[in-house]
């Protein structure tokens, strides 16, 4: 069984932190479990927690706007696995989730209070820098995956 610090150390967002810094974050982390099909958070909700997946798989979905008489629908943009994060909006203004997170499998995650993490990042600027550096890697990766998804859909529809 891995400790909370070990789980955080394997996550790209926290991998640059030392043991003492990881301990500060891990002291406020809570373990959460979700069943397959459970909604972790909804797009548009206040972002209160960042979660690090320990087990399972979570789909990140966005709501597509209504077109004419069609009802709005959700599109899966990414799937997040072990050692990855969801809910990064908890540490970036305006602190609103930009997507919904739906469990594709039974999922276990560490929940970190966005408020507590932001306070630590403000108090210790090196922690803030390292966490944001890791977060930028995550956001860049997801942006790239979304771009690839859009290109592939465009190819499938013939550019329409």
Image: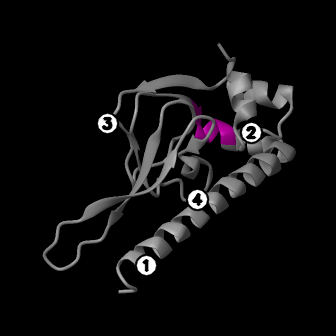
Between disc 3 and disc 1, the foreground one is 1
**Residue 44, image x and y in percent?**
39, 56
- Checking the image for residue 56, the label placed there is none
- Checking the image for residue 37, the label placed there is 3
Between disc 4 and disc 1, the foreground one is 1
Is disc 4 placed on a helix, strand or loop?
helix
- Checking the image for residue 14, the label placed there is 2
Spatial separation of the CA atoms under disc 2 and disc 4: 17 Å
Q: Residues within 10 Å of mark 2 (few under 14, many from 20)?
A: many
Q: Earlier in the sequence, mark 2 or mark 3?
A: 2
Tally of numbered discs? 4
Single out the residue that lies furthest toward the top: 1
Q: Which residue position is annotated with label 1?
A: 155
Between disc 2 and disc 1, the foreground one is 1
Q: Earlier in the sequence, mark 4 or mark 3?
A: 3
**Residue 20, image x and y in percent?**
85, 26
Spatial separation of the CA atoms under disc 4 and disc 1: 20 Å
Spatial separation of the CA atoms under disc 3 and disc 1: 30 Å
**Residues at marks 4 and 3 touching, judged by CB atoms closer than 8 Å:** no
**Residues at marks 2 and 1 touching, judged by CB atoms closer than 8 Å:** no
**Residue 116 shown in magenta:** yes
Quadrant of the rendered image containing residue 43: bottom left
Quadrant where the N terminus sits is top right
**Residue 26, image x and y in percent?**
69, 25
- Magenta highlight range: 111-117
Q: Which residue position is annotated with label 4?
A: 142
């Amino acid at each position: 069984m891995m400790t909370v610090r070990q789980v955080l150390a394997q996550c790209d967002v926290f991998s640059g932190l030392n043991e003492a810094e990881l301990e500060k974050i891990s002291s406020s982390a809570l373990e959460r479990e979700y069943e397959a099909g459970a909604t972790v958070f909804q797009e548009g909700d206040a972002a209160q927690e960042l979660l690090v997946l320990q087990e399972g798989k979570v789909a990140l979905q966005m709501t597509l706007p209504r077109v004419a008489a069609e009802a709005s629908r959700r599109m899966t943009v990414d799937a997040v696995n072990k050692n990855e994060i969801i809910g990064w909006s908890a540490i970036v203004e305006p602190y609103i989730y930009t997507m919904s997170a739906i469990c594709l499998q039974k999922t276990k995650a560490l929940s970190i209070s966005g408020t507590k993490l932001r306070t630590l990042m403000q108090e210790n600027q090196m922690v803030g820098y390292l966490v944001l550096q890791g977060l930028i890697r995550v956001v860049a990766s997801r942006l790239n995956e979304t771009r690839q998804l859009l290109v592939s859909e465009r190819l499938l529809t013939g550019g329409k």
